[in-house]
Image (cartoon, rainbow, N blue to C red):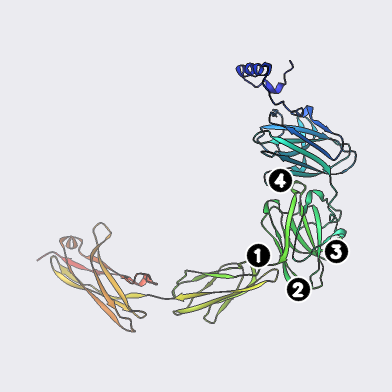
Amino acid sequence: MTLSVRRLCLPVLGFVAAVTVLLTPGVANAATPSNDDFDSATAVTALPFTSAQDNTQATTAADDPTSCYPSIRASVWYDYTPAADGIVLATVASSGSTPLIAAYTGTRGALTPVPGACTNFNTGSSATFHVTAGTTYHIMLLFPYYGTQVSFGLATVAPSPNDDFAAATVAGFPSEQSGDLARASAEPGEPTPSCDATADHSVWYRYTPDRTRSVSVEKVAYYVSPAITVYRGDQLGDLSEVDCAPSMSVANSVFTATAGQTYYIRLGASVLNTTRFDVRISTAPTLAPKVYAFPERPSVYNDVEFSTYAGDPLGRPLVTGEVSFGDGTSAPVTGDPIHHQYTKDGQYQVVLTGATADGRTGTGSLTVPVVTHDVSVSDFVVPASARVDQTKSISVSVADTRYDEDVSVELFRLSENGYYQSVGVLTQHVVAGAGRKVVFPFAYTYTAADAAAGKVSFQAKATLKTGYYDDAHPQDNTITAVTATVRPKS
């Protein structure tokens, strides 16, 4: 009995059990596929080629390449040597877990991946790649989980009909275009997209609008997305780029198409990312600009920061525009936050108008309520001198020129430990008015500790009790005063 080196990894007891099973009459066992190993690959001698086989007993070799997928549970191999240059399509269909496809050139232990000939769970069950006459291509079907019953096919396919600029497909409007960039090539003299220099394999579409409109070219599936470049011009060497969106990203192309002007839409990818694509050519979505203010409810003391957004489903920013603040002033849209300070309270209608680079425009608005709640401590009267156990009056005056407020004033004494201790709190309703002030009367009894220090420092702090609004200018809500002399009890 001849045993494959691949089976020597079985433990001794497992090996004996396996041999016993093989030698026991009356027990049916699925055979290992004949092309289970690289060295016994099935030769594909003519195209189209199809093969259906049971791979449930397929295994993997220690040197199976993992460049396409890192974890291989089983693999089978096919070899193909073309007689002429061309493009081939490899396909798989399975009753269970669909295998991935990976193609290589070279020899065992020194295999080189064929660019673009590696499928994954997103790109589906087929791989298209270019082949060169006389080169042997080693095609591996790899099973990440387990071998299954698989149908494998290999056939020649024609190049993309719109592979060359001169053969650009006329794109209807609106329309959805699909194809396979693996069937495309790099045409000599093609312009290099400004946003994706690697996207050298391409196909071309031609669009001439009957009226001026904003046009979008959107990728239907981002994980197989090509680079999209839009050009004006009539000759391959005389094209002017209008817009560019890189491959393998969610970016889409959008541009203003002028009536009667022909535009060329190039879909491209690097050889490593050439795969099937789907794009939609249609009217670009309208903008829904938005403007946000921070803080949302400012006062006249706030430097308000306005942020602008295009509200574009395609993600294009505003490049021009204006923010009108509703008080007779405005500022241009620059892409950076805009700052503004209001001078009086009121309801302000902020209006944003803007445009994206492709010419789409839109308007958005926001109501900004400017409300300034502000009281101040205008006077703080403490005794100039006192004796221990003497109770004296301390008064705090609060001024308010804006809104009637409920105000709390807390009186503090600076302790010998260096921090303020609360002495008492008073709350009153303060009626707003020019020149008006409300007195908060406190009484304080001086202590031996005050006499030991020789003086006592007081602090008064006013706080709004309105609830929703804080004081907009708290810097004038706190004040200090000192009783300069405190003598012992006589």
Cα separation between marks 3 and 4: 38 Å
- Nearer to us: label 1 or label 4: 4
**Closer to the N terminus: mark 4 or mark 2?**
4
Q: Position of residue 40 (x, y in %)?
A: 79, 27
Which residue matches tag 3?
A: 238
Q: How far apart are marks 3 and 2 (CA)?
A: 23 Å
Image depth: mark 2 or mark 1 in front = 2
The residue mark sitting in front, 3 or 4, is 4
- The residue lying toward the viewer, choosing from 472 and 210, is 210
Q: Is residue 381 above or below residue 12?
A: below
Task: Check disc 2 and give the amino acid type.
Answer: Thr
Element type at marker 2?
loop
Residue at 73%, 55% in the rendered image:
278
Front-lying residue, 165 or 149: 149
Badge nearest the viewer, 3 or 2 = 2
- Sooner in the amino-acid sequence: mark 3 or mark 4: 4
Judged from the image, the secondary structure of the residue bearing numbered disc 3 is helix
Mark 3: few, some, or many residues within 10 Å (few <14, many ≥20)?
A: few
Residue 489 visible, this angle = yes
Crowding around mark 2 (Cα neighbors within 10 Å: few <14, some 14 to 19, many 20+) is few
* Residue type, mark 1 in image: Arg
Which residue bears the numbered disc 2? 212
- Quarter holding the N terminus? top right
Residue under label 4, please give it.
124
Give SS at disc 4. loop
